[in-house]
Amino acid sequence: MQETGSISIHTENIFPIIKKFLYSDHEIFLRELVSNAVDATQKLKSLAQLGEFKGELGELKVRVTVDKEARKITISDRGLGMTAEEIKKYINQIAFSGATEFVEQYKDKDAATKDQIIGQFGLGFYSAFMVAEQVEIWSQSYKDDTLTAHWTCDGSTEFTLEEPTGEHAKAERGTDVVLHVAADSDEFLEEARLRTILTKYCKFLPVPIEFEGELINNTTPIWTRQPSELTDEDYTKFYQELYPFSEPPLFWIHLNVDYPFNLTGILYFPKVKNELQFQRNKIQLYSRQVFITDEVKDVVPEFLMLLHGVIDSPDIPLNVSRSFLQADAAVRKINTYITKKVADKLSSLFKQDRAGYEEKWNDIGLFVKYGMLSDEKFYEKAKDFVLLKNVSNKLFTLTEYTEHIQANQQDKDGNTVVLYTNDAEAQHSFVAAAQERGYDVLNFDQVLDPHFVGQLEQKLEKTSFKRVDADTLSKLIEKESTPESVLSEDDQKKLEETFKAAIANETMRVKVAALSPQDAPVVITQNEFMRRMKDMQRTGGGGGMQMFGAFPESYDVTINANHPVAQKVLAGNGTGESLAKQAFDLALLAQGMLKGEALTAFVKRSTELL
Ligand SMILES: Nc1ncnc2c1ncn2[C@@H]1O[C@H](COP(=O)(O)OP(=O)(O)OP(=O)(O)O)[C@@H](O)[C@H]1O
């Protein structure tokens, strides 16, 4: 029996369109055909379990072979097979209508959406024509009394279907799909290229895949197994399998839900450096153990992309555009679920082993803060286990820290003032002065910290954050009883003039204030607000803040009226100005701001004074 026929499709010329536009993703043909072979094998296994197939299963492998000379790639399975009738139904109708639908969707889309669709649309069987000029199917159904079917098609709407006689009349059960590789697809005749593709997409398929006699896959990756039967070693070994040559992960979460959506997977917390660096290792997305993509941007919340591992879900729609994906209810639920799981894991680590958690803080701190900044729900959970580190490297939770400083660091209005440094070395003199007063200073020296400070300030009631060098201590935390000035108004004026003349610099705003005699004689500070704006701008705070780039750096110079040096400057007949200069330079020196010519002049002047 031989039949020739015409496949009815609605769109004219879908073939050239598919060929042309799918160019960048031609390699997925192999994923599609191997997945079909795996599905056919799994279906046969189910039939056997149900007692509907009583024959020998035999060795259920999918074999991929390539014959470069003959320009052929063959994908063979020992699955349930198809009769000629079934080929007509499943291949001529379903597979081709899938392709038609694809082109229909594809036609009116803009370029960006097209890319999207290409990457994620499972074109199924039809994708074979992206690389082949002719495709043959040899198939023998598992059903008794059926004959082998042989279908050929050159990618046009014409096909032939026959049931061969003689030695080919009844083949072994299963399907061989034979691709006659087109002239412009030579690359797919290379063994190395095919092996790379198979390893990328088929590494964890549930049925053994053999390529040129070699097993390609691990059929039971650990995310498909029960956590109770897995050891830590299994998890770290699997991490190595996913990301060879990477440092071992810190810890992991085994995801497993089947309601209201289906999702399994393992998320690993890597050792993240203190910078927001682009990660080479990405989360991989699978659908029933078939690799789909490692662009998981819309499936997991952005901050979770710092994690590594795999997510496997048949419920993630892969054939729709990105904007649709973001609005998709299943995707949103998956997002929420993963976020909650991650927060719960961190919370239990924190509660069960505080010391271990603190040890890991350097690696997970950035992640936790990023999560708090980008996800309100995560903030709500993480506020109980986020840690603040002070300059003595002691770690506190938010509540612990408020308790720690409350007694000492409340200002006259009852606000708690948190002091912090972003560079303990450079701001050492300020940190030391604060500590002398019995104040505590936090270390906020990571890239996200300026944003994090802003967030905490909004969230925590009656609490403000001030960098230690933003003002004099008496101003940073204003107390009820401020020291009185021992100088008369006239003397204060005179003192200010002397310093102004000595400093002679427009960007230094000089003022005299009554500080404690224990405070430094001269304090140079940079206004908190202005500096924060500049910091934000540096870490990408958005276009609206560009204008601050135009502002020159400016500093406040506070002269302590109650320090003995003030009296000396006032009393110094003719030497007042050089004493003032000396005191100012010492303040600059303490902050690492004295450089170049000014530093040389200072050293010279100091030597002369000696
Ligand atoms: N190797 C095979 N053995 C048995 N049946 C097959 C085989 N390959 C394809 N089929 C049949 O042809 C149908 C169409 O295949 P196609 O790959 O186009 O779509 P699909 O697998 O149903 O969906 P998709 O690939 O988009 O997930 C399949 O549903 C299946 O019934």
Image (spheres, helix red, strand yellow):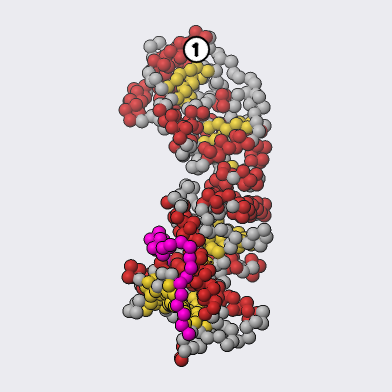
x and y percentages locating residue 542 in the rendered image: 47, 36
Q: Would residue 16 be found to the left or right of residue 397 on screen? A: left
Judged from the image, the secondary structure of the residue bearing numbered disc 1 is helix
Q: Which quarter of the figure has residue 402? A: top right
Q: Which quarter of the figure has residue 252? A: bottom right
Say if residue 361 shows up in the picture: no
Q: Would residue 254 be found to the left or right of residue 35 on screen? A: right
In the foreground, 96 or 121: 96
Q: Which quarter of the figure has residue 405? A: top right
Magenta span of residues: 1-27
x and y percentages locating residue 514 in the rendered image: 55, 18
Magenta-span inclusion, residue 602: no
| x 46%, y 52%: residue | 109
Residue flagged by tag 1: what amino acid is it?
Answer: Gln
Circle 1 residues within 10 Å: few <14, some 14–19, many ≥20: many
| x 53%, y 25%: residue | 472
